[in-house]
Image: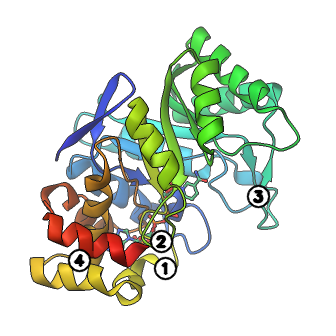
């Protein structure tokens, strides 16, 4: 495994996205625990989750609880694993995603997440998505308070634009540790945010880095150069995709989702794939 910086910490260059284990199409608990254990076996030290990764209204934190259970039952050491959770999104249970970016909600949500994760301090807490009904300053101000009080170790934002990233970093006194935005061959519109993160030295965590739960398997069919390079190098198109993202800037830490051990095990080999500039040109052209 290779490593990258995230705030003051060092994390594996590939993280595990927990969402597929808790939303539509999720597998049984045993398979999910085995998936998290497979990630740990492969050297993953960053696991991304959110209180909103669940299906039904009465199971808020389903994914956080799975991760806590998997870490507790893992045979090896887990002290160096950073669990990154989020607050500010809610799932009332009808399939919709609602928002609450108020300071009151974020504080209560972070307290509840810490309890589910079984920690006194959440490693990385990310504001899930700006709430148009709440001033952005209020939401980030809440993160700042949580950081100052020590309930969270690092603060991040998600689904933010260039102006919001700068504003969040200012409010946090230069302590914005990470930005999590959608980025994949199919979705390149966060390139400006990625570049800003590279300039400021803030970790950029592409979400749905393979195109999302339903499209990830067909990545090579949709973007032929990814399949071609994969064939030439004897790896999967998904590994080529993650290696391509890693090569875009050294602040990038992809968090591919998985609900099966095989897929996360495959994804963790991406940092070993060094792409040539010719291959990067072909892949860059495919994604534009
Ligand atoms: N901040 C946000 O608003 C936001 C939004 C969406 C997602 N996220 C985060 O980002 C993470 C990743 O996004 P995502 O899960 O939506 O999409 P994704 O990572 O693009 O795709 C996930 C799917 O990719 C498949 N996969 C993973 N590695 C593979 C490989 N090597 N070969 C073939 N298939 C592979 C998995 O299949 P199996 O299920 O069969 O293992 C999984 O279902 C999420 O899990 C979540 O933590 C954040």
- Ligand 1 neighbours mark 2 (CB distance < 8 Å): yes
The residue carrying mark 4 is 236
User: Within the image, what quadrant is residue 198 found in?
Assistant: top left
Q: Which residue lies under the disc numbered 2?
A: 211
Q: Secondary structure at mark 3?
A: loop
- Please give left or right for residue 210 compared with residue 214 in the image: left
Q: Which mark is residue 215?
A: 1
Q: Position of residue 173 (x, y in %)?
A: 56, 14
Cα–Cα span, label 2 and label 1? 6 Å
Q: Secondary structure at mark 2?
A: loop
Which disc, if any, is residue 97?
A: 3
Separation of marks 3 and 1 at Cα, in angstroms: 20 Å
The answer to whether mark 3 and mark 1 are in CB contact below 8 A is no
Badge 3, how many Cα within 10 Å: few under 14, some, many 20+?
few
Whether pointer 2 and pointer 1 mark residues with C-beta atoms closer than 8 Å, the reply is yes
Closer to the chain start, of discs 4 and 2, is: 2
Mark 2 touches mark 3? (CB < 8 Å) = no
- Kindly report the distance in space between the C-alpha atoms of the residues bearing marks 4 and 3: 32 Å
Element type at mark 1: loop
**Tags 1 and 4 in contact by the CB under 8 Å rule?**
no
Image location of residue 288, percent across then percent down: 44, 73
Between the residue at mark 2 and the residue at mark 3, the CA separation in whole angstroms equals 19 Å
98 vs 106: above or below: below
Residue 219 vertical position relative to residue 26 in the rendered view, above or below: below
Q: Residue 138's spot in the image, x, y percent?
A: 78, 25
> Is ligand 1 within 8 Å of the beta carbon of the residue shown at mark 1?
yes
Label 4 Cα neighbours within 10 Å, binned few <14 / some 14-19 / many ≥20: many
Question: How far apart are the two marked residues, 1 and 4, measured between alpha carbons?
Answer: 15 Å
């Amino acid at each position: 495994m290779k490593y990258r910086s995230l705030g003051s910490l060092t994390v594996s260059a590939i993280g595990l996205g927990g969402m597929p284990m808790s939303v539509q199409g999720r597998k049984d608990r045993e398979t999910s625990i085995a998936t998290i254990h497979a990630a740990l076996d492969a050297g993953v030290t960053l696991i991304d989750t959110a209180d909103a990764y669940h299906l039904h209204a009465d199971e808020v934190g389903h994914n956080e609880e799975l991760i806590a259970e998997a870490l507790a039952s893992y045979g090896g050491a887990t002290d160096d694993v950073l669990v990154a959770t989020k607050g500010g999104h809610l799932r009332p249970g009808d399939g919709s995603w609602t928002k609450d970016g108020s300071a009151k909600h974020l504080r209560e949500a972070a307290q509840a997440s810490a309890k589910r994760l079984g920690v006194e301090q959440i490693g990385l807490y990310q504001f899930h998505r700006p709430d148009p009904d709440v001033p952005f300053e209020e939401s980030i101000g809440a993160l700042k308070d949580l950081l100052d009080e020590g309930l969270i170790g690092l603060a991040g934002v998600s689904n933010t634009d260039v102006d919001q990233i700068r504003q969040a970093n200012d409010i946090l006194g230069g302590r914005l540790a990470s930005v999590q935005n959608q980025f994949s061959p199919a979705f390149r519109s966060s390139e400006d945010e990625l570049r800003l993160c590279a300039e400021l030295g803030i970790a950029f965590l592409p979400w749905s880095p393979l195109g999302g739960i339903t499209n990830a398997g067909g990545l090579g069919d949709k973007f032929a150069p990814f399949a071609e390079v994969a064939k030439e190098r004897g790896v999967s198109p998904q590994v080529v995709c993650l290696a391509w993202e890693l090569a875009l800037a050294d602040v990038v830490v992809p968090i591919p989702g998985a609900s099966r051990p095989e897929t996360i095990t495959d994804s963790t080999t991406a940092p070993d794939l060094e792409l040539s500039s010719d291959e990067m040109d072909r892949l860059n052209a495919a994604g534009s």
